[in-house]
Amino acid sequence: MNRRIAAICLLLAPLGSTAIRADVALNNLFTDHMVLQQGIQNKIWGKADPGEEISVSIAGQSHTTVAKKDGSWSVQLDSIIEYGGPHTLTVEGNNTQRFEDVLIGEVWVCSGQSNMQWPVRQATDADLAIATADLGQIRLISVPQVGTQEPQWNFKGEWAVCSPENVGDFSAVGFFFGRQLHQTLHVPVGLIDNAWGGSACEAWIDRNLLSSDDRFSPLIDRWIQTETTMPEAVKAYEKRLDVWKQKSEEAKAEKKSPPRRPRHPESLLTGNSRPGNIYCGVLAPTIGYGMRGAIWYQGESNASRAVQYRSLFPFMIDSWRNEWGLGDFPFYWVQLADFRDEKSEPADSEWAELREAQTMTLTKLDNTGEAVIIDLGEGKDIHPRNKIDVAKRLARLALAETYKLPGIQCRSPLFQSMQQNGNRLVLTFEHVEPKASGWRPFDVRDPIGFTIADSSQKFVHAQARILADGRIEVWSDTVSDPVAVRYAWADNPICNMYSSAGLPMTPFRTDNFPSITEGRN
């Protein structure tokens, strides 16, 4: 049963057990083999009879609370400093539940759309990864895909010990990230995969929060229009369905492939783009679970609205942090890869603008990081199979900045400033050694991937060279008075600049010329 079907079954299941409330029920994040976050006060929660006294104990500590009028209850455990286990978590009320093989370790949420959901079994070197996945201190749990406007308190799922039998269907980026942490830190790791392919950023945010912010009024208004006109849309769908049935019969009689069945418009209401849908159905049941941080791979579905993403993406991160109650926890994301056809001449690009919006978030929020993968895409496939290197770049961020391991370079070179020198523009960068050897151009000696423009805003391919102090000089003999430079500014750019640590330069532009996605909501 796939995650989507399992989710629907959960919503439609009889509610007798929760109506009776005879027994203590816990959120399904609390099962055998769970990982509790080391070094914080973990929250344990569930439901019981109103007024029922609940006792929770683990590792020599015990906490008692009383269920509220609505039956909900929660306790905060004291911080557990020592990694490892196994421990037993005991919850006592009218009944007693014992959860075995509980580990204390590092917990990360793995979120986003299809490139985060992409399973190990379809990644590069899947056979090797699966065969060597007998990793008892890595624990996995996946949250089913539920699209709803009603906040859910639970989901169908349970923790599992990582093994060759179950890792194949788990997030490849998530698993490879967690494996790297485990191999480096030598501690248990728990991974929560809640990714949903094709999802839009706004679906991951509480709709009430979006509605209260004027910046997102056009987005909400567009969806209100969709919702209020749904009856008319259904009628139009039924007419299209009748036509489809007739054409399908004709195709069958002629032994031809039938046309594609029209999509029911009401699927939008439970889908992965409606504001708040994934927040309520997927995220809400997990909010508050103790974790160290989150990794995120999303943006493809918002590329046509890249300027809006400049506000939407940091708004989402802020909302998660506020609701989780764990402070400004680490949030690391993957910048969009190179994709689509290569262009022979400079052109505007939605994907370049989305990458820019992602990078802008670094300056808006603390404790964030970006894994640049402008070199790992596959051009013709929106789902690059090389998830190992994606995960390693995320792991570099976590190991260097969350876990403070020395000697690990984790940030891609980032444009800092520009000076004009005649018909040339000289650029400086962060996160690269200030010397020529701080750079490692790939394949050829000189930098490629730069374009340059004068005040006409028409970009042409540029020449570039690395100066002795690590700055990069850019020019074109056809541009006498340049004002702007861009690098890797395309859906699928041809570019070659890496730091000496092997991290690709972050795509950028120095200008603020009008964006093609401006005004789209």
Image: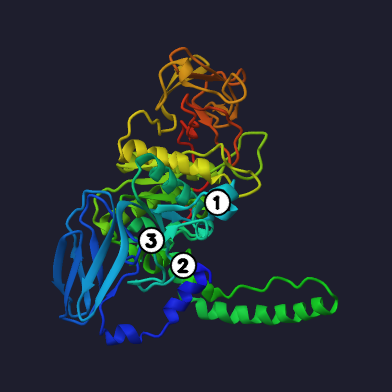
* In contact (CB < 8 Å): disc 3 and disc 2: no
Task: Determine the CA span between mark 3 and mark 1.
Answer: 50 Å
Q: Is residue 515 visible?
A: no
Residue lying furthest right:
254
Task: Determine the CA span between mark 3 and mark 2.
Answer: 26 Å
Q: Earlier in the sequence, mark 3 or mark 1?
A: 1
Q: How many labels were placed on the picture? A: 3
Residue lying furthest top:
468
Left or right, 245 with reference to 197: right
Q: In front of the other: label 1 or label 2? A: 1
Mark number for residue 294?
none
Residue 262 lies, in percent from the top left, at 64, 73
351 over 9 or under it: above or below: above
Residue depicted at x 75% and y 78%: 248
Camera-side residue of 279 and 343: 279
Secondary structure under the numbered disc 3 in the rendered image: helix
Left or right, 31 with reference to 221: left
Residue 120 lies, in percent from the top left, at 54, 53
Residue depicted at x 37% and y 60%: 205
Residue depicted at x 45% and y 66%: 274
Quarter location, residue 12: bottom left
In the rendered structure, which amino acid carries the disc numbered 2?
Gln
Residue 311 lies, in percent from the top left, at 38, 50
Residue carrying label 3: 217
In the rendered structure, which amino acid carries the disc numbered 1?
Ala
Residue carrying label 1: 131
Residue 216 lies, in percent from the top left, at 38, 58
Residue carrying label 2: 145
In the rendered structure, which amino acid carries the disc numbered 3?
Ser
Q: In front of the other: label 3 or label 1? A: 1
348 over 33 or under it: above or below: above
